[in-house]
Amino acid sequence: MENILEINNLCKKYDNFELKNISFKLPKGMIMGFIGENGAGKTTTIKAILNIIKNYSGDIKIFGLDNNNYDSKIKEDIGVVLDDMFFPEILTPKDINNTMKSIYKNWDSKMFNNYLNDFKLNNNKQIKTFSKGMRKKLEIITAISHHPKLLILDEPTSGLDPVARAEVIDIFQKFIQNDDCSILLSSHITTDLEHIADYITFINDGEIVLSKTCDELLNRYGIVKCTDIEFKKISKKDYIKYKKNKYNYEVLVDDKKSFKNKYNVDVIDRITLDDLMVLMIKGMK
Amino acid sequence: MIGFIKKDVAMIKSNFKLLGILIVVYTIMGLYGKMDISFILPFMSVVIMISTFSYDNFNKWEEYASTLPDGRRCCVKSKYITTLLMILITSIIVIILSFIISYINTKTINYEQTFVSMLGTVFGTLLVLSFMYPVIYKFGVEKARIGIFITVFGIVIIGDLLVKYINFTNIMKILNNMNEYILILLLILSCIIFIYVSYRISLKIHLHKEL
């Protein structure tokens, strides 16, 4: 399968934080959920992909092209929503439309205005008069109105109420109907990702912990709840992490079927991305 | 790049009222033979443009712009071009108003004096701009305010020392003997060089900046 985004051994060092050998691939036509706790390195990785930060090592290829050598060409086909980065708030959606149609070759004013109407965003009002949710919608509309092939979204649904979130997710799903398009979506709201993501990449403390298809994660991974005596019987190599609660243990396993057979366990709970994140970060080995 | 200029123009639209007021004040003061404040209009263009850096900074526009095609380069280029356009337009307005005021007051128009005085104003404004923009790109608009303050004081002190310790009589003699058109040409040329060098420095800073 052709990859739309490919990152190999991305490293970036700050005084108090480091991205360590980040590598993952996003195939064409797929949505990748990029998850991790605050400060794990999601935004730094996205900033490196987009060349907002400099002086990193490693390879980043977008549409098969090096992101440094073909920066401008690549950016014609990328749409972005970044946390707290946008047009100055004294501008109006009309100003954004005027600006963008001279920046992108494929800018679609009609599409932009249709979405403004759908979301009931006033064309002539300054951005600063919009609520956080309205502003986010405007950012998303702006990101998709030049028919990009890759959407890079950093927390695009944060600050949105459930109805608005559903509307936005609908847009992403429509966007992905074109098989040539992909989305890299970083989000804390993992329930959204469970609905739409094909792949999940989990970053923790600057390192990629796992990058797998969403189906594989949700079907193969599971949580075993057991007593102290039962837990002591489990071999370390058969689980990834565990958490000791007041009355039981929660054990994260990456192969429900073989674990069931080996330990004769009846019930292994289906995992959610939230459970996965908590156990991976807070759990012990 | 046109898109970036459109964005900057859209941002300064709200300041057009202020420029309008200044034009009225300038016209009234000129008609009543009070102080000549023609220098204020081109200078205000730079002040207004600097305010756009603050808005950009507040909403992290430069980071966002770097995700657009050729965003980093266009960001810098558009600031310089929009500022130069503003200076040009305000200078033309001042020149036209000066002609009208001069004609109403004296029934004559002193073309030469108006152009020379405007050229001096534009030169001074461009000099300030040439120093300020690279400082803003390097340190950000907030820190740059202190830098600008130090730069202006530095220029005044260095100028004062130069006047004290260097004999300018010979230089003045040479300048006085020079054809005035050559002087004007030299002034225009130095404006172009200042702006070009300033732009290149700003661009280099911004292209390699960690946003």
Image: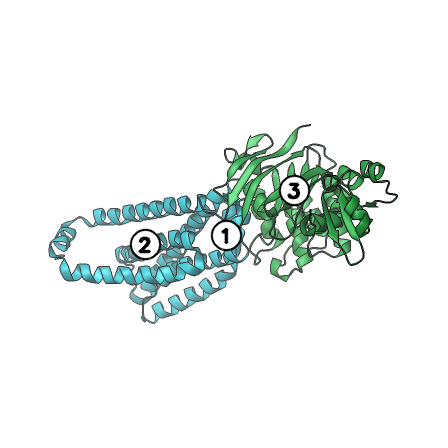
Q: Earlier in the sequence, mark 2 or mark 1?
A: 1
> Do the residues marked 2 and 1 share a common chain?
yes
SS at mark 1 in the image: helix
The residue under the point 56% across, 59% down is A90
Question: How many numbered marks are there?
Answer: 3
Q: Which chain is green?
A: A
* Chain letter of disc 1 in the image: B
User: Residues under labels 2 and 1: Cα distance?
Assistant: 21 Å
Between label 2 and label 3, give the one nearer the viewer: 3
How busy is the neighbourhood of tag 3: few (under 14 within 10 Å), some, or many (20 plus)? some
Seen from the viewer's position, the closer of residues A226 and A252 is A226
Which disc is residue A109 wearing? Answer: none
Which disc is residue B127 wearing? Answer: 2
Query: Which kind of residue does numbered mark 2 sit on?
Result: Leu
Q: What residue would you read off at disc 1?
A: B8
User: Residues under labels 3 and 1: Cα distance?
Assistant: 43 Å
Query: Which kind of residue does numbered mark 3 sit on?
Result: Val
Which disc is residue A209 wearing? Answer: 3
User: Residues under labels 2 and 3: Cα distance?
Assistant: 54 Å
> Do the residues marked 2 and 3 share a common chain?
no
How busy is the neighbourhood of tag 1: few (under 14 within 10 Å), some, or many (20 plus)? many
B2 over A64 or under it: above or below:
below
Q: Position of residue B46 (x, y in %)?
A: 40, 57
